[in-house]
């Protein structure tokens, strides 16, 4: 008989991905979501969603912890600029968790639970769990859900250590040793439930991560003591730990018994970058759930399922181009252009080259020219400032060298201007009214996608 485990990795505000993904998934599952699993495990903010699932709390309410309270939870303390203490107070997080979990205890969970944390005094790993030796009492059952979640979410430098009621020790983020709690969940299952390894099925969901090599590129180009270097190293440590746990679990229970959902982001996203996470991740989660639902259902039913390619990777795998669009613009239009780029990328699944996202140390000119070479379409943000820019003119010239007929160039008209002859004959898109940028971007994306579908990779 199958023993099914749901494992949710730690991911800060990126935990919104897991909550929205599972919420979208439940729409296609006939049974209450918790009944699809015998055990749920969650680390960091993944513990919030995991505990919510185990308590049969509506996943929409869980997603609201991130969507409605994220900006308050990750609001820096007035003294956060001082060189001591964590960046954020635990009070907003506690208030959001109390609203969700009230006075529920671990004993109230409908399915088995494993939530890792780390002892702040001894550095020893700690797993809060409903599982225990059958002949022994389990003191964890009396712990309040709010305290367990706070302990697992207490990421060093972000939140203060947490001390659950009834515990003598204080704890920090479970991601310190089990950012991906899959290995801990399987170990508890084998030790306390005596389930044969080949009877275990594991659905493991990450909180999204950067594309392979992105952290490494940052690591090789940053000063060794800079905050950005610390962030890059932390991201690499968490990602490596998660992958190692996933690989070891696959070695133990067999690759066919593991399904890992971890769609990559094309740009880095910090654990506390709230606005960007709330903009980018919910639509990504919904798209991935729609792509995965058939595979997930079959997997949980015990069928052998091939690895699920991320929905966001489908176009990339088939195309000869690394990017779908290159955005050429003048600095005066950069804020508006970046907003359009975000919509094209996050809502319409297009791979976007934007200088702010792609240019690293070295020659910006050479990197921009390479970006044009790697992109299928060149979008020209046309304004008076852009037409007066030698830089934009150089990008236009290079695009014409690659395709003299200009079939890959799409002017985006930002304001009333006298178009040069080489642009007048092209199929331009009207962006003259900034208030209608969302609508204009929808039309642009539809045009690009229809053209790619007709022409093929």
Image (cartoon, grey):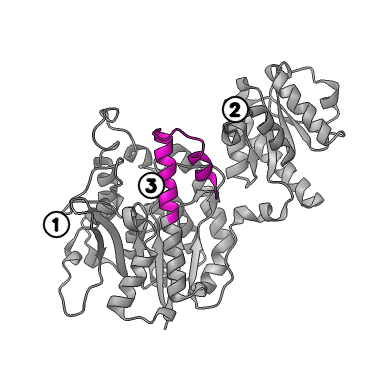
Q: Element under label 1?
A: loop
Q: Is residue 174 left or right of residue 232?
A: left
What x and y, as percent, mark residue 425? 86, 29
Give the residue pinned by disc 2.
336
Q: Residue furthest bottom?
A: 1
| Residue 23, above or below 99 | below
Q: Residue at x 79, y 38 (%)?
A: 408
State the image quarter where residue 324 is shown: top right
* Of pointers 2 and 3, the one earlier in the residue sequence: 3
Q: Is residue 337 visible?
A: yes
Give the residue pinned by disc 1.
167
Front position in the image: 124 or 65? 124
Q: Element under label 3?
A: helix
Spatial distance from mark 2 to mark 3, Cα to Cα?
28 Å
Crowding at dot 1, Cα within 10 Å, few <14 / some 14-19 / many 20+, comes out as: few
Q: Is residue 15 visible?
A: no
The tag on residue 126 is: none
The tag on residue 12 is: 3
Crowding at dot 3, Cα within 10 Å, few <14 / some 14-19 / many 20+, comes out as: many
217 in the magenta segment: yes
What x and y, as percent, mark residue 240? 44, 55
Q: Is residue 305 left or right of residue 242?
A: right
Q: Are marks 2 and 3 in contact (CB under 8 Å)?
A: no
Front position in the image: 424 or 393? 393
Instruction: Please report the bounds of the magenta region as a residue range.
Output: 211-240
Q: Nearer the viewer, mark 2 or mark 3?
A: 3
409 in the magenta segment: no
* Of pointers 1 and 3, the one earlier in the residue sequence: 3
Front position in the image: 395 or 438? 395
Spatial distance from mark 1 to mark 3, Cα to Cα?
24 Å
């Amino acid at each position: 008989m199958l023993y099914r485990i749901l494992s949710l990795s730690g991911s800060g505000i990126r935990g919104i991905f897991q909550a929205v993904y599972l919420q979208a998934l439940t729409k296609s599952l006939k049974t209450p979501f918790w009944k699809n699993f015998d055990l749920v495990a969650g680390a960091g903010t993944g513990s919030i969603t995991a505990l919510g699932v185990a308590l049969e709390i509506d996943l929409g309410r869980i997603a609201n912890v991130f969507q409605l309270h994220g900006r308050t939870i990750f609001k820096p303390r007035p003294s956060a600029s001082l060189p001591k203490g964590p960046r954020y107070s635990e009070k907003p997080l506690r208030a959001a968790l109390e609203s969700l979990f009230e006075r529920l205890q671990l004993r109230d969970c409908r399915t088995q639970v494993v939530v890792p944390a780390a002892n702040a005094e001894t550095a020893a790993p700690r797993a809060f769990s409903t599982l225990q030796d059958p002949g022994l009492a389990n003191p964890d059952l009396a712990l309040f859900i709010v305290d367990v979640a706070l302990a697992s979410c207490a990421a060093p430098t972000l939140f203060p250590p947490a001390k659950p009621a009834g515990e003598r020790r204080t704890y920090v983020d479970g991601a310190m040793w089990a950012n991906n709690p899959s290995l801990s969940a399987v170990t508890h299952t084998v030790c306390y439930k005596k389930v044969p390894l080949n009877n275990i099925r594991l659905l493991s969901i990450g909180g999204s991560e950067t594309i392979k090599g992105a952290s490494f590129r940052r690591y090789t180009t940053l000063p060794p003591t800079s905050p950005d270097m610390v962030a890059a190293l932390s991201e690499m440590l968490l990602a490596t730990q998660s992958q190692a746990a996933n690989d070891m679990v696959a070695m133990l229970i067999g690759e066919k018994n593991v399904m890992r959902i971890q769609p990559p982001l094309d740009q880095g996203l910090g654990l506390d970058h709230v606005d960007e996470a709330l903009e980018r991740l919910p639509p990504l989660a919904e798209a991935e759930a729609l792509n995965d639902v058939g595979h997930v259902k079959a997997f949980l039913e015990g069928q052998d399922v091939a690895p699920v390619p991320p929905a966001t990777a489908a176009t990339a795998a088939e195309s000869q181009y690394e990017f779908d669009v290159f955005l050429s613009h003048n600095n005066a239009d950069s804020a508006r252009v970046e907003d359009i780029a975000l919509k094209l990328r996050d809502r319409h699944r297009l791979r976007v080259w934007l200088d702010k996202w792609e240019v690293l140390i070295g020659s910006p000119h050479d990197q921009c020219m390479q970006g044009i070479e790697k992109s299928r379409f060149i979008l020209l943000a046309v304004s008076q400032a852009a037409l007066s820019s030698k830089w934009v003119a150089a990008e236009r010239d290079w695009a014409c060298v690659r395709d003299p007929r200009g079939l890959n160039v799409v002017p985006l008209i930002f304001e009333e201007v006298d178009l040069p002859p080489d642009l007048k004959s092209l199929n331009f898109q009207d962006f003259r009214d900034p208030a209608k940028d969302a609508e204009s971007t929808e039309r642009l994306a539809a045009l690009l996608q229809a053209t790619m579908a007709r022409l093929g990779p």
